[in-house]
Image (tube, helix red, strand yellow):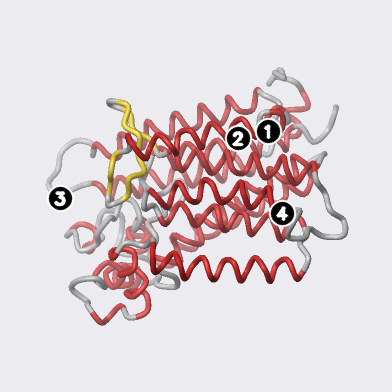
């Protein structure tokens, strides 16, 4: 269903605050990434910055392209998009490229992308379609959650085979979020919790690599090996703290510029911002993320049918967990997982996925009313 984007109802019901918040975070992300990737004495624009600029451009093109199509068409093709994302995950196993110990990239010559990012949206489409068509006023039991459990287990297993622990967490957390949102019986929640704990134990013993196990031990005892396993986390905390209230100033973060902070353009992009802009700048970013998630939940609450409600909630859950996992890791509140910070961290696949998600939220908001 193709709709005319100049229709008056689109202009009236367009969620401008969500778009401005997204533009604000994207602009801050580019400014911050420029600092994170600029080497002292370097002339010209950093290549990673230029690559991210292109990715954001593609992402916003996709965002506005999504607006043209009525979001309800994704309910019809939800399972197909999910299956397509599984095919891409399967292709990673024999043909994937390994980056930072994770075999999670498909390389198409000059273009590379992470199918796990696309799979997040495919998973949300599939869960939204299921829960919108199978309401249980009395609460879901374990049997009625069999299909969603299977929808989660397949991509989870494929991504764990790729050693991408960070991406695999999203499927568990989004499944758990949908289960609570759709209404599960207390006994069912308890059973799923036991399964999750047993699975986590087995995964730690049999699936996690020594490097991933080291991240967990580092979280528990970061000072036990300050120059080795604990180096990343310690430097992250020191960098964040060094910004104090007002920060050291743009392009003046010494932990950033002297390369004390590892992976500063991806996992540890937030400490770069905290060092240069301090507590006040960090608060602005926190506030923008809070507003984005709040707007996403508002869109879901006001959607005119169940699929829109579920889809909006799923994207809100994706945004929340991605922000929480990244910030929790770099601040030492949870183990590091290698998850990017939405619209701030370098990564084309992540940026495009997030912006498509924002486009879907805007789409749902615009089509709340018939007239």
Residue identifier under label 3: 40
Tag 1 secondary structure: helix
Tag 3 secondary structure: loop
Quarter in which the C terminus is drawn = top right
Separation (CA) of disc 2 from disc 3:
37 Å
Say which of marks 2 and 4 sits in front. 4
Tag 2 secondary structure: helix
Front-most of residues 362 and 209: 209
The percent coordinates of residue 114 (x first, y second) are: 40, 39
- Residues marked 1 and 2 touching at CB (< 8 Å): yes
Residue identifier under label 1: 363
- Residues marked 1 and 4 touching at CB (< 8 Å): no
Q: Determine whether, in the image, residue 289 is placed left or right of residue 72.
A: left
Position of residue 209 relative to residue 119, above or below, is below
Structural crowding at the residue carrying mark 1, measured as other residues with C-alpha within 10 Å and reported as few (<14), some (14–19) or many (≥20): many
Quarter in which the N terminus is drawn = top right
Quick one: label 3 or label 4, which is nearer the N terminus?
3
Separation (CA) of disc 1 from disc 4:
28 Å
Numbered label tally: 4
- Residues marked 3 and 4 touching at CB (< 8 Å): no
Q: Determine whether, in the image, residue 324 is placed left or right of residue 267.
A: right
Separation (CA) of disc 2 from disc 4:
29 Å
Q: In the figure, residue 302 lies in which quadrant?
A: top right
Quick one: label 2 or label 3, which is nearer the N terminus?
3
Residue identifier under label 4: 145
The percent coordinates of residue 263 (x first, y second) are: 27, 55
Residue identifier under label 2: 359
Separation (CA) of disc 3 from disc 1:
43 Å
- Residues marked 2 and 4 touching at CB (< 8 Å): no
Residue appearing at x 52%, y 40% in the figure: 119
The percent coordinates of residue 148 (x first, y second) are: 66, 49
Front-most of residues 148 and 3: 148
């Amino acid at each position: 269903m193709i709709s005319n984007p100049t229709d008056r109802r689109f202009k009236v019901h367009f969620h401008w605050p969500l778009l401005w918040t997204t533009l604000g975070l994207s602009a801050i992300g580019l400014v911050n990434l420029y600092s994170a990737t600029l080497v002292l004495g370097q002339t010209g624009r950093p290549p990673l910055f230029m690559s991210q600029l292109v990715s954001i451009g593609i992402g916003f093109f996709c965002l506005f392209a999504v607006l043209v199509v009525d979001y309800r068409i994704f309910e019809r093709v939800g399972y197909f998009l999910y299956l397509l994302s599984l095919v891409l995950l399967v292709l990673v196993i024999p043909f994937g490229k390994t980056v930072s110990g994770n075999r999670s990239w498909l390389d198409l010559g000059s273009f590379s992308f992470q199918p796990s990012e696309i799979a997040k949206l495919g998973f949300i489409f599939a869960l939204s379609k299921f829960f919108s068509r199978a309401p249980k006023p009395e609460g879901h039991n374990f049997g009625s959650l069999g299909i969603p459990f299977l929808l989660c287990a397949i991509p989870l297993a494929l991504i764990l085979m790729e050693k991408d622990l960070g991406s695999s967490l999203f499927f568990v957390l989004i499944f758990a979020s949908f289960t609570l949102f759709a209404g599960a019986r207390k006994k069912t929640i308890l059973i799923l919790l036991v399964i999750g704990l047993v699975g986590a134990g087995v995964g730690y013993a049999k699936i996690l690599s020594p490097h991933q196990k080291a991240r967990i031990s580092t979280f528990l005892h970061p000072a036990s090996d300050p120059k080795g396993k604990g180096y990343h986390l310690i430097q992250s905390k020191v960098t964040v703290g060094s910004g104090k209230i007002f920060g050291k100033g743009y392009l003046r973060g010494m932990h950033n510029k002297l390369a004390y902070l590892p992976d500063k353009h991806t996992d540890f992009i937030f400490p770069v911002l905290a060092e240069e802009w301090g507590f006040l700048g960090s608060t602005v970013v926190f506030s923008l993320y809070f507003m984005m998630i709040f707007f996403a939940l508002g869109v879901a609450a006001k959607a005119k049918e169940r699929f829109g409600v579920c889809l909006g909630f799923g994207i809100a859950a994706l945004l929340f967990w991605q922000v929480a996992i990244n910030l929790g890791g770099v601040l030492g509140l949870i183990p590091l997982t290698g998850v990017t910070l939405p619209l701030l961290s370098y990564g084309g696949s992540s940026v495009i996925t997030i912006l498509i998600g924002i486009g879907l939220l805007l789409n749902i908001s615009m089509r709340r009313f018939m007239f």
